[in-house]
């Protein structure tokens, strides 16, 4: 009698095929996967394989991207809470890991089509402002981990690849002839003197924001509009909070962070005159309401399509250097040209955080309602 009856042989073939799938997955195309947290087995792994080898196996199985994507879709479907969106650096700094920010920084997430869509969207604004001689400038505020790269855990730095999405963006903007500024070298050099990003927050601090503003002015061909940090910023003071600390549930920062108060000469104060009707107000739950003001002194008309990196930080800088300014959210490549045509800026700046600049398929709930209008 045969070892396997004829009708069972097909089950045996299927069983062996299923067992081989994880191995075959190493050689077939896969979906993009989150960054590996273990890149090699520990030394002498055979002595305690369950402790020293299992973490590597959990990061190196076949079809890892597809399996984790399916798991993520299931977690979203059932509404289960997701894991923590932060990573602790070697010096205790906190880095945001949501929206694949770390994978983007180290070149594991590169989406050429989305980068090109962003460039095409930006180029549309250049064509709109060309008739009155307006100048378009694009800047991308780097992820904190892009600038503080040396503070990332070793297993992250060991997975660095080139080019990154930021590299690709610079190349595509140059190819399109759009004025832009690569803020990475500037901010990396500046941190040798003092910090440019907060330790426990996803954003740059007042000094980093000012350097970004000055880079935008230089890229617009208006270096005379740059603001001397010595004029704008007072000596640093302790800062005991941060959005990542709140995410962590920590009460206070230890050691404390620092922030730079603005000098009174640069503060807008109460001299701004609202410009009604230029930008439609958003719904009450929208966290970034538009700004539109006349400043009462000479200067160019400046408009910013930005996000949280410029919403609070740049208001005073814009008021200090413009005769009138508008700030409104870029809505993740969904902002239209109506406000631009009404305001007619001399300088139009598109600013987006590195993790947010690729035109997104999904947008936050607070933005979805606005983009539908």
Image: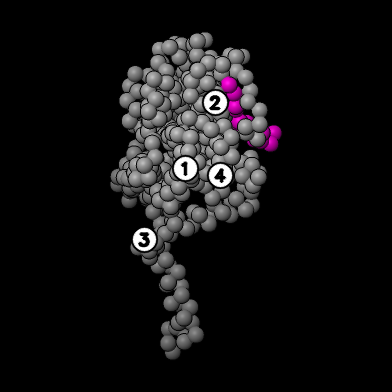
Q: Which residue is mark 1?
A: 127
Question: For residue 26, which numbered disc appears in the image?
Answer: 3
- On the rendered image, what quadrant is the C terminus found in? top right
The magenta stretch is: 281-294
Q: Nearer the viewer, mark 4 or mark 2?
A: 2
Question: For residue 334, which numbered disc appears in the image?
Answer: 4
Q: Is residue 68 at least partly visible in the picture?
A: yes
Q: Is residue 99 at least partly visible in the picture?
A: no
Residue displayed at 45% across by 14% down: 232
Q: Position of residue 37 (x, y in %)?
A: 40, 44
Question: For residue 253, which numbered disc appears in the image?
Answer: none
Apparent side of residue 44 relative to residue 20 in the rendered image (left or right): left
Residue displayed at 41% across by 57% down: 61
Q: For marks 3 and 1, give the CA distance.
A: 46 Å
Asked if residue 288 lies in the magenta stretch, the reply is yes
Q: Nearer the viewer, mark 3 or mark 1?
A: 1
Q: For marks 2 and 1, give the CA distance.
A: 20 Å
| Label 3 crowd bin: few (<14), some (14–19), many (20+), radius 10 Å | some
Question: For residue 325, which numbered disc appears in the image?
Answer: 2
Q: Nearer the viewer, mark 4 or mark 3?
A: 4
Q: Nearer the viewer, mark 2 or mark 1?
A: 1
Q: Earlier in the sequence, mark 1 or mark 4?
A: 1
């Amino acid at each position: 009698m045969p070892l396997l009856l004829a009708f069972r042989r097909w089950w045996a073939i299927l069983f062996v095929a299923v067992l081989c799938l994880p191995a075959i997955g190493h050689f077939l195309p896969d979906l993009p996967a989150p960054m590996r947290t273990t890149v090699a087995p520990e030394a002498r792994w055979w002595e305690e394989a369950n402790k020293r080898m299992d973490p590597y196996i959990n990061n190196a199985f076949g079809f890892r991207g597809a399996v984790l994507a399916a798991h993520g879709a299931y977690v979203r479907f059932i509404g289960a809470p997701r894991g923590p969106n932060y990573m602790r650096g070697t010096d205790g700094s906190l880095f945001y890991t949501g929206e694949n920010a770390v994978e983007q920084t180290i070149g594991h997430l590169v989406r050429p089509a989305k980068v090109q869509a962003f460039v095409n969207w930006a180029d549309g604004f250049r064509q709109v402002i060309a008739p009155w001689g307006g100048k378009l400038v694009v800047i991308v505020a780097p992820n904190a981990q892009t600038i503080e790269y040396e503070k990332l855990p070793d297993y992250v730095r060991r997975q660095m690849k080139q080019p990154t999405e930021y590299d690709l963006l610079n190349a595509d903007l140059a190819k399109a002839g759009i004025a832009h500024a690569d803020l990475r070298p500037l901010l990396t050099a500046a941190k040798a003197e003092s910090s440019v990003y907060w330790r426990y927050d996803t954003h740059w601090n007042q000094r980093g924001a000012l350097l970004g503003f000055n880079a935008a002015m230089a890229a617009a061909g208006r270096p005379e509009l740059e603001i001397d940090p010595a004029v704008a910023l007072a000596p640093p003071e302790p800062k005991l909070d941060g959005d990542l600390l709140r995410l962590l549930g920590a009460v206070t920062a230890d050691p404390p962070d620092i922030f730079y108060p603005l000098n009174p000469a640069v503060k807008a104060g109460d001299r701004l005159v609202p410009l009604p009707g230029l930008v439609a107000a958003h719904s009450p739950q929208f966290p970034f309401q538009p700004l539109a003001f006349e400043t009462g002194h000479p200067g160019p008309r400046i408009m910013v399509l930005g996000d949280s990196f410029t919403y609070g930080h740049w208001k005073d800088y814009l008021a200090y250097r413009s005769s009138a300014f508008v700030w409104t959210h870029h809505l993740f490549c969904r902002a239209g040209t109506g406000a631009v045509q009404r305001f007619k800026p001399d300088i139009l700046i598109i600013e987006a955080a590195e993790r947010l600049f690729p035109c997104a398929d999904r947008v936050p709930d607070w933005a979805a309602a606005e983009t539908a209008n």
